[in-house]
Amino acid sequence: MTVFVLICSVILLAILEGLSRRDDLRELIAEFRIDSELTEPGEEVTLRYTVQNNSRWPVLYAALTLQIEPGIRVCEDEAWLQRNARRDRMGTQLRRHFFLMPRKKTSGRLRVCCTRRGQYRIGRYYLMRGDFMGLDPVLRSDDLGLRLICTARRCEIPAPETLGGVMGEVSVRRFILDDPCMLRGYREYTGREPMKQISWMQTAKTGQLMVRQNDFIIDRNVSILLNMEAAPEAALERCLEMLRSVCEELEAQRVPYALFTNGDLFSVNEGLGRNHVLYIQRRIGLSRLICYLSFSRLVDQYVYRPRDNSSCIVITPGRLENVRAALPRLQRCTGREPLLLCGGEEEP
């Protein structure tokens, strides 16, 4: 009887082992997502993962290993890291063991943050599934498919005067022929308006003389010129921090602004709002501090482009002798003195 039970047990174990080997990792699905792709140094981002068993058989043993790249720090408490993590020059490894019943899933989350500005791949994952006897485990590895763009941190800057504001703060130049784009509406003719102001189309529609009413005041806006000529990396990083701070300050004042650079941030058309500032912050995070033009060429391109009543903010890493030579052209172009911010040791 003992021999019979032993033989039946061996046969049952062999059947279970064979069935467990037939169901490979294609039915074990791992998914990953993050709360936000755009972050700043030290800001925590939550990485969420889910492993789901889509097969008809239970997974008695599975292991998920996350390989977090260097430059990304895990923000869990130290006691948890000592139990679940291993650090080396390749980054941080975190491993979790679990089992799953059929059509069930398990989830978890991990808090991470970037240590400095730049673009980062979060890392890879290794998903291992063991067979019933634990003799022939199956391993799958792939990239998480997630990245983080870490923009520059905010810094303290001299509070700029309000360079713009609500509609109606700045008078425009008047010409002999009025600009049709400044049309605000129509009103009845009083006899004191010049004949050229009469709108014959509106007169025909209403049956009485109507004149055009123009708006000769416009809003002020700001142009930010960023100089990325060869300079120490720390000074250029400081300039990017100042750029972010200036953009957020203008957003708080509701002043439209445009960005012009001679580097790999390129130029951004005038705008205002959340999407506008987030786009610039993404460009800051992706920048590799590459310069394509001299600051003098950048000023030439700015002076000869169509523009309206813009004020200028110049951000430069240093070497102000080259920058100061171009400032008079900006002042003649805009009619006011540019605001100069220096990111290097040399003060303006």
Image (cartoon, rainbow, N blue to C red):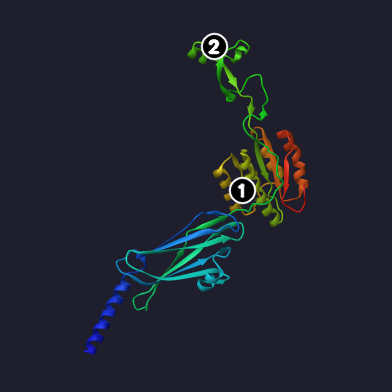
> Mark 2 or 1 closer to N-term?
2
Q: Is residue 90 among what the camera can see? A: no
Q: Quadrant of residue 298?
A: top right
Mark 2 element type:
loop
Q: Nearer the viewer, residue 265 or 149?
A: 149
Give the vertical position of 179 relative to 281 (above or below): above
The quadrant holding residue 62 is: bottom left
Q: Position of residue 33 (x, y in %)?
A: 46, 58
- Give amino acid for label 2: Leu
For the image, the number of numbered tags is 2
Q: Residue at x 45, y 70 (%)?
A: 96
Residue 48 in percent (x, y) is at 46, 60
Amino acid marked by disc 1: Leu
**Residue 43, relative to residue 79: is it above or below?**
above
Q: Position of residue 347 (x, y in %)?
A: 77, 49
Image disc number at residue 300: none
Q: Quadrant of the N terminus?
A: bottom left
Q: Which residue is mark 2?
A: 209
Image-quadrant location for residue 127: bottom left
Residue at (56, 17) in percent of width and height: 187
Label 1 crowd (10 A; few <14 / some 14-19 / many >=20)? many
Q: Look at mark 1 in the image and give the residue it sits on.
A: 265
Residue 57 on image: x %, y %: 30, 69
